[in-house]
Amino acid sequence: MIIIGLCGGSGSGKGVVAELFASHGIPSVDADAVYRDLIYAGSPLLNRIKDAFGESVLLRDGSLDRKTLSSIVFSNKEKLMLLNKITHSAIIKEAEIRFSQYKKLGYSAIIFDAPQLFESGFNKKCDIIIAVTAPIDLRIERLIKRDNKSKASILERLDAQLPDEFLISNSDYILENKGDIKSLSDEIDKLVKIILK
């Protein structure tokens, strides 16, 4: 099975790209969704996060206080690296279980939608890497709408991510997502033919 690593900064539109690939019979495993599945109240992964960052990252019901954790890690690169060290291996282990399930179902290719594909080291296990880019102003606009956060907090998060220049120079294919779904879909049609050839 071909493993396609899908990377791109917040607001670039990786989710839309993954949906368009799914319409061609190439499903995806979303690293963020895997993470959310692994941090239920009392889970081993959430306990490791609590041990590293303290009780303040938990809500009263024992679930993760995402807002507090985000404010801790996105303002301190060392703490972000610590969070990544704790979470990446658990996410990859679960993602690989899901890949094998798709393989058993007969799929010939799968997308791994991973915002931190390179930081996790999983890029080395991918057969193909696709980077999704978008103009920074458009990304900020999308994130303000989606996450209902201030521009300052969004810029802080974007600053903690790898720049587009790095993703472009380390990927096999680049998809620019300016919001024109028709042209994006046409590009993906061409890519699918190349990948599945």
Image (spheres, grey):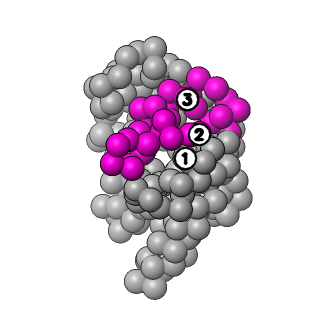
Look at label 2 and name its amino acid.
Phe
Question: Helix or strand or loop: what does disc 2 sit on?
Answer: helix
15 vs 129, nearest the viewer: 15
**SS at badge 3:** helix
Q: Which mark is residue 72?
A: 3
First to last magenta residue range: 53-81
Q: Is residue 10 above or below residue 129?
A: above
- Whichever of labels 3 and 2 marks the residue nearer the N terminus, that label is 2
Amino acid type at mark 1? Lys
Sequence-wise, which precedes: disc 3 or disc 1?
1
Q: Disc number at residue 53?
A: 2
Q: Secondary structure at mark 1?
A: helix
The residue beneath circle 1 is 50
Disc 3 + disc 2, Cβ < 8 Å: yes
Q: Nearer the viewer, residue 41 or 91?
A: 41
Q: For the residues carrying marks 3 and 1, which lies nearer the camera in this image?
A: 1
Q: Amino acid at mark 3?
A: Ile
